[in-house]
Amino acid sequence: MDAALRLLEEQSLSSLGLREVTRVVGVAPAAFYRHFRDMGDLGVALVEESLGSLHVVIRRVLAGPEDSDEVTDRSVAVVAEHVRAHRAHVRFLARERHGGVRAVREAIAAELARFGDEVADALAAQEVSRGWSREDVRMLAGLYVDHLVMTASALLEAAPGEEDRIADTARRQLRLITLGRRHW
Amino acid sequence: MDAALRLLEEQSLSSLGLREVTRVVGVAPAAFYRHFRDMGDLGVALVEESLGSLHVVIRRVLAGPEDSDEVTDRSVAVVAEHVRAHRAHVRFLARERHGGVRAVREAIAAELARFGDEVADALAAQEVSRGWSREDVRMLAGLYVDHLVMTASALLEAAPGEEDRIADTARRQLRLITLGRRHW
DNA sequence: CGCCACGGCAAACAGTTGTTTACTGAACCC
DNA sequence: GGGTTCAGTAAACAACTGTTTGCCGTGGCG
């Protein structure tokens, strides 16, 4: 899985060959089948690995003081840190989210939907959401999650030195959304 | 290009073979080189084709009455219609935006940045933006463009019959953003 | 008429691919 | 200590890949 992840920094899953992976690992091609049925199978395993660590991230954002500026600052910081620390995993997710392998796409979509639900629960529990319908809370959560994803992608592709500017923009965007929330 | 686009509905560019394309067209492999140097070259050509039609879409949204609910409804309707009419092109863009071919990624990024600038110009000209800094206008434009992209992707992957619900969510999200804008 | 560029062809090239088969050694458990 | 599972091997398979080469008909232009 590590070898695959490394190879996937410069290509997408549907073009990654099984032999390519085994070659990097230093193992015979047939050995691959001891672990995965297929390349798609490996992809799904990578999705789980990648999103496991992301769950932790979400918790870290949702815990802590509720003051809204505090929360947006923490969100962006945590996302930036995560991208820096797990660059290859994040790139993999961004690339394969709409990539050419159905099973992987679906695994990512399902997991992102779960994130949305989690965020929605956290939002619903907040004072500001008093009187909101369940669907409205869910749509706001979707907006937050989408924004988080876009920010991560932007940070990934940022030229070195541009990260701060991007993080700053992301913070202002989050703040604007939260403003809309308070006046809904 | 049409053949490639068809083949790309179920795989990504970096795994699409030149022979695969010529086979579908019904032409010898060598004939490919009469038109493109490479597969990446074909990809860049497809980006231009895909985003040409999108420019028209943006104009269509930005023209017309400025009343904000009117504008959000029109935006979502136009995006939905575009996805329906140019499904393969939109899918290609979504897939290759973070895909495995650098030249294509960069072509898409450059074009999306131009969209952002265009939207920013239009926003700056509106009454509501009085007193906004240039950067704040640009960050709002980015938010709109990102949301448009996310909406298009969501519509692409929607199960049949789910489109209306997604469009509705997108409208509410846009409305919330616009609300934040007015209270900025 | 002659020319020439265009878009096409067949054939060959050396590599690479996914998958199957039968076999082997180590580790583990009772 | 014997059996079983686990993770690995080498070799062979047919199929497919991108690229180069030299050749050919058609169409348009001067």
Image (cartoon, coloured by chain):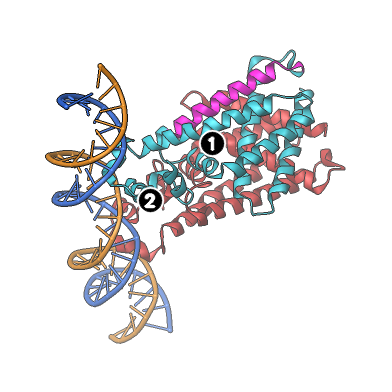
Chain colours: A cyan, B red, C orange, D blue
- Mark 1 chain: B
Residue D15 location (% of width, % of height): 21, 49
Is residue A114 positioned above or below B41 on the image? above
Which mark, residue A24? 2
The amino acid beneath tag 2 is Val
Q: Quadrant of the N terminus of chain A?
A: top left
Residue D22 location (% of width, % of height): 24, 77
Residue drawn at x 74%, y 29% is A71
Q: Residue furthest right?
A: B131
Q: Is residue B179 visible?
A: no
Which mark, residue B153? 1
Disc 2 element: helix
- Do dots 1 and 2 share one subunit? no
Main SS category, magenta section = helix
Which mark, residue B177? none
Q: Which residues are magenta?
A: A104-127
Q: Residues within 10 Å of mark 2 (few under 14, many from 20)?
A: few
Front in this rendered view, residue A21 or A110: A21
Q: CA distance from mark 1 to mark 2?
A: 34 Å
